[in-house]
Image (cartoon, grey):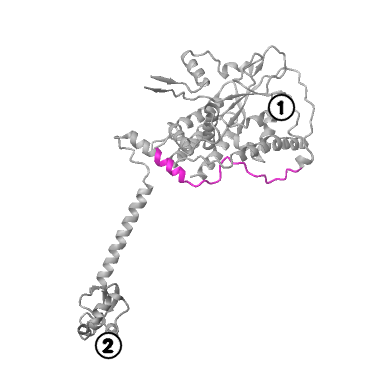
């Protein structure tokens, strides 16, 4: 018998599983953090392959894109496959939903701004999102150089977005220009659509702060996935 | 009655089976001694006895030549049967190419079925055409030249009176352009390394808080990446 421990980080996880550390969860640390939360999320259709890619780079010294065969194996194992696939038994989808739901429901915090990855690269949504983040920071008492309601300052914020976010993202994107697009089966796409639809219905009932924005984001995700069907 | 006559690969139409066709009759009379161009006809053509027979025999010019007569109805029937055969074969081929997933209810050989399923999907994905990437960065439509001509003004860092605790920034893996975001926070607030990671620990840093220093703003945002991996340990014999 042999035990393969892939990396030191896995060894750390293994040890913490054997001897569970008494690590405080975010809700227990509310005195050391502000009341509001900025939640960053991404469409599962691109988040899953990107997550897999980043893991391969971080823990397996992957250079370049992971092979298509490996992506498909990962996808079949963790997104799930077959006719009985639902959002309830898809490991990655459940994880995605739990992540958002955990932070959305966490007391005493509330989500002041959802930051979808897709908005960062959008020339209209990107600056608008930074404007909202700036407003959140001002409301929470942070020192902020720019007044988001001032027209000149918003122009500066937009230029900061252009210089610090958009152009570097374009450069990153160029490096991946010859990468294949990570695809899914129709069952998996259908599962994600129905899962996101259910998700948006669930949060429409509960009405936590920021839910309207979250529902809008989820609907955009649904539409994006539908285009791939 | 209309019949089709196959004679060594050539086809002729016979209006009445009882009498020879007009065309063959005509040809037979007009060229009684001229053999067709094909070398195979030459043997029969040399035999003068055969030429002097009936008009059709004169035309065919030999005794051993195959002569098959098929009625129009039969020909039509054959064509339908051949079409059906071709359609069936095409249907089977298409069905086979589309048939990817074996029946889910089949409990026997589940692992074999699953591996076949994965293999089939690998092949499918290989063949799939790559359309526009979903996460590709879109080109700009608006005019951003003003950012070059008049870059953002560097404003002094505003001062604050009371201590502010960092904000949680839970991030789904790869959902935030990390390096670029950190610089943005620094530019917006003037707080150096304003964006921190919850897991990063040093003698002076723990859980996004700077230790042993009285600072008003230690961090602006504290990123907590969702890292709930299923640790898969492979145990081998």
Secondary element under disc 1, as helix, strand or loop, is helix
On the image, the x and y values in percent for residue A71 come to 48, 36
The numbered dot on residue B29 is 2
Front residue of B220/B20: it is B20
The reply to whether the magenta stretch includes residue A120 is: no
Between marks 2 and 1 in the image, the one whose residue lies nearer the viewer: 2
Task: State the mark number for residue B186.
Answer: 1
Chain letter for mark 2, please: B
Quadrant of residue B75 within the rendered picture: bottom left
Q: Residue at coordinates 45% horizontally, 41% vertically from top-left?
A: A185
Which chain's residue wears label 1? B
Determine whether A202 is above or below B1 in the image.
above
Q: Magenta stretch: give its range.
A: B118-145
| B217 left or right, relative to B168 | right
Could you tell me residue B129's position as x and y percent?
50, 47
Label 2, secondary structure: give it. Answer: helix
Predominant secondary structure, magenta span: loop
Question: Considering the image in quadrants, where does the C terminus of chain B appear?
Answer: top left
Q: Report x, y in % for residue B222.
A: 63, 23
Seen as rendered, the residue at the extreme top is B212
């Amino acid at each position: 018998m042999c035990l393969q421990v892939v990396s030191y980080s896995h060894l750390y996880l293994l040890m913490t599983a054997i001897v569970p550390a008494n690590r405080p969860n975010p809700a227990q640390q509310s005195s050391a953090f502000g009341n509001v939360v900025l939640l960053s999320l991404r469409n599962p259709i691109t988040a899953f392959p990107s997550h897999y890619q980043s893991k391969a780079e971080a823990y397996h010294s992957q250079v370049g894109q992971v092979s298509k065969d490996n992506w498909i194996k990962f996808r079949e194992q963790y997104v799930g496959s077959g006719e009985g696939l639902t959002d309830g038994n898809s490991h990655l989808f459940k994880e995605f939903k739990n992540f958002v739901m955990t932070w959305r429901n966490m007391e005493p915090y509330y989500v002041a701004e959802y930051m979808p990855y897709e908005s960062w690269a959008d020339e209209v949504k990107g600056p608008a999102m930074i404007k909202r983040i700036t407003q959140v920071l001002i409301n929470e008492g942070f020192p902020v150089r720019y007044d988001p309601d001032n027209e000149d300052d918003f122009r500066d914020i937009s230029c900061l977005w252009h210089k610090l976010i958009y152009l570097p993202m374009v450069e990153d994107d160029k490096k991946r220009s010859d990468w294949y697009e990570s695809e899914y089966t129709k069952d998996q796409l259908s599962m994600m659509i129905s899962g996101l639809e259910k998700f948006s219905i669930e949060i429409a009932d509960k009405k936590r702060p920021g839910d309207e924005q979250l529902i809008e984001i989820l609907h955009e995700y649904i539409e994006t996935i539908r285009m791939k069907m | 009655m209309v019949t089709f006559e196959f004679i060594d690969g050539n086809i002729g139409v016979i209006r009445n089976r009882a009498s020879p066709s007009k065309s063959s009759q005509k040809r037979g009379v007009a060229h009684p001694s001229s053999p067709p161009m094909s070398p195979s006809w030459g043997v029969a053509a040399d035999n003068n006895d055969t030429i002097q027979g009936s008009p059709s025999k004169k035309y065919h010019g030999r005794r051993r030549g195959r002569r098959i007569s098929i009625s129009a109805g039969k020909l039509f029937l054959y064509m339908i049967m051949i079409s059906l055969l071709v359609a069936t074969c095409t249907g089977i081929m298409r069905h086979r190419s589309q048939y990817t997933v074996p029946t889910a209810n089949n409990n026997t050989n589940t692992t074999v079925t699953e591996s076949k399923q994965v293999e089939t999907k690998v092949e499918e994905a290989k063949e799939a055409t790559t359309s526009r990437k979903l996460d590709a960065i879109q080109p700009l439509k608006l005019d951003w030249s003003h950012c070059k001509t008049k870059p953002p003004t560097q404003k002094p860092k505003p001062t604050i009176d009371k201590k502010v605790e960092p904000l949680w920034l839970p991030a789904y893996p790869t959902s935030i352009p990390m390096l670029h975001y950190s610089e943005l926070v620094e530019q917006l607030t003037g707080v150096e390394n304003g964006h921190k990671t919850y897991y990063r620990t040093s003698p002076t840093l723990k859980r996004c808080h700077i230790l042993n220093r009285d600072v008003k703003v230690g961090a602006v945002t504290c990123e907590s990446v969702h890292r709930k991996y299923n640790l898969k340990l492979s145990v081998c014999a």
